[in-house]
């Protein structure tokens, strides 16, 4: 029995999200996440996982388990704010910055988590644009970006989403790596902010943007042209964690975050309505890494990794 905020996302907004994140038609909505089900797991997750979960993990979980699946997706800062403020009471919370989830949810809302997938930052671009042509020709991406007009490049909102602040940290690390004085400040003033992470790459497809700073899985899912970035600043290399941590960003609410590898972690909040469903879903995630790698995510030898004391049903 649900006791907090209903049965999941509004069907209309969820339909719009599905169409953007996975290229689905409205007629396919409902194949993952039966919003009217009474026995379902409710997952509040980072927006970059929307397509992987709606088109892969969610349907597979429904087929395998005794629960339905209902997901909502926002920038990780927004996800955590909804939990901390008591606006949402999901069975599973998933973030794209492991340290951020722990900083915001421990100890009042959770006391453990598990990392289950990794990612990296890339530049996705429209090949038919002037900037895209230069990237395709192999020019240094930072030289191309330096010549961009205002709004030609988009990032997600750094105040609600780790991908957004990682874009700004990318500019800072590249500035240091290549001696580009003022590069971060110039780019911060020039890029457009897209509030809804799953819609970020839509700007390339509809001709509004020439380039976007995205996660690799998002570009793979949309079959976008990609410029891979050096490990020194793509946030995909654990060996470069100390280098990433040299850059930081303070959100509009005064929370300072430092650069870190892109690692997704999940927890079951203390006030989850259906912790049994939450445990079943997290266990399913850990046992089905192929569903994640099929959608462009990475599961390496360091995953999964537990932090804190997980439930017996999940612990290795």
Image (cartoon, rainbow, N blue to C red):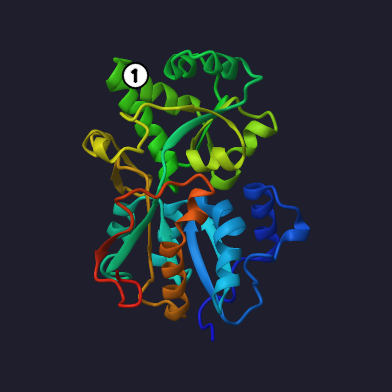
Is residue 305 in view?
A: yes
Left or right: residue 141 versus residue 134 is left
Is residue 74 in view?
A: no
Name the residue carrying label 1.
Answer: 182
The N terminus, quarter of image? bottom right
Q: Residue furthest right?
A: 27
Q: Is residue 106 above or below residue 229?
A: below
The C terminus, quarter of image? bottom left
Q: Is residue 224 above or below residue 108?
A: above
The residue that appears at 47% across and 77% down in the rendered structure is: 277
Report crowding for label 1: few under 14, some 14 to 19, many 20 or more residues within 10 A (C-alpha).
few
| Residue at disc 1, secondary structure | loop
Q: Nearer the viewer, residue 273 or 295?
A: 295
Rendering coords of residue 16 (x, y %):
69, 54
Rendering coords of residue 106 (x, y %):
27, 65
Q: Is residue 126 above or below residue 164?
A: above
Q: Quadrant of residue 105?
A: bottom left
The residue that appears at 46% across and 47% down in the rendered structure is: 297
The residue that appears at 53% across and 57% down in the rendered structure is: 73
Q: Nearer the viewer, residue 216 or 26?
A: 216
Left or right: residue 288 versus residue 260 is right
Q: Quadrant of residue 114?
A: bottom left
Left or right: residue 171 versus residue 284 is left
Rendering coords of residue 24 (x, y %):
71, 52
Q: Nearer the viewer, residue 156 or 280?
A: 280
């Amino acid at each position: 029995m649900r006791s907090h905020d209903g049965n999941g996302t509004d069907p209309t907004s969820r339909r719009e999200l599905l169409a953007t994140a996975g290229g689905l038609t409205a007629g396919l909505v409902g194949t993952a996440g039966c919003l009217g089900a009474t026995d379902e797991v409710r997952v509040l997750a980072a927006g970059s996982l929307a397509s992987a979960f709606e088109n892969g993990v969610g349907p597979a979980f429904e087929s395998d388990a005794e629960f339905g699946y209902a997901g909502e997706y926002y920038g990780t800062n927004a996800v955590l704010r909804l939990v901390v403020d008591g606006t949402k009471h999901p069975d599973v919370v998933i973030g794209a910055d492991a340290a951020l989830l722990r900083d915001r949810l421990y100890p009042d809302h959770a006391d453990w988590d598990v990392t289950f997938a990794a990612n990296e930052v890339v530049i996705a671009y429209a090949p038919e644009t002037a900037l895209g042509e230069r990237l395709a020709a192999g020019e240094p991406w930072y030289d191309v970006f330096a010549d961009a007009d205002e709004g030609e490049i988009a990032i997600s909102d750094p105040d609600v989403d780790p991908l957004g602040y990682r874009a700004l940290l990318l500019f800072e690390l590249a500035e240091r790596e290549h001696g580009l004085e003022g590069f971060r400040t110039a780019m911060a003033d020039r890029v457009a902010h897209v509030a809804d992470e799953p819609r970020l790459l839509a700007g390339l497809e509809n001709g509004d943007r020439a380039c976007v700073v995205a996660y690799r899985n998002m570009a793979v899912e949309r079959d976008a042209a990609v410029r891979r970035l050096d490990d020194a600043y793509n946030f995909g290399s654990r060996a470069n964690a100390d280098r990433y941590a040299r850059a930081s960003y303070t959100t509009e609410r005064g929370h300072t975050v430092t650069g870190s590898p892109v690692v997704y972690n999940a927890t079951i909040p203390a006030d989850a309505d259906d912790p049994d469903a939450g445990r079943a879903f997290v266990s399913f995630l850990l046992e089905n890494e192929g569903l994640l790698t099929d959608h462009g995510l990475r599961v390496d030898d360091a995953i999964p990794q537990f932090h804190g004391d997980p439930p017996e049903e999940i612990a290795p």
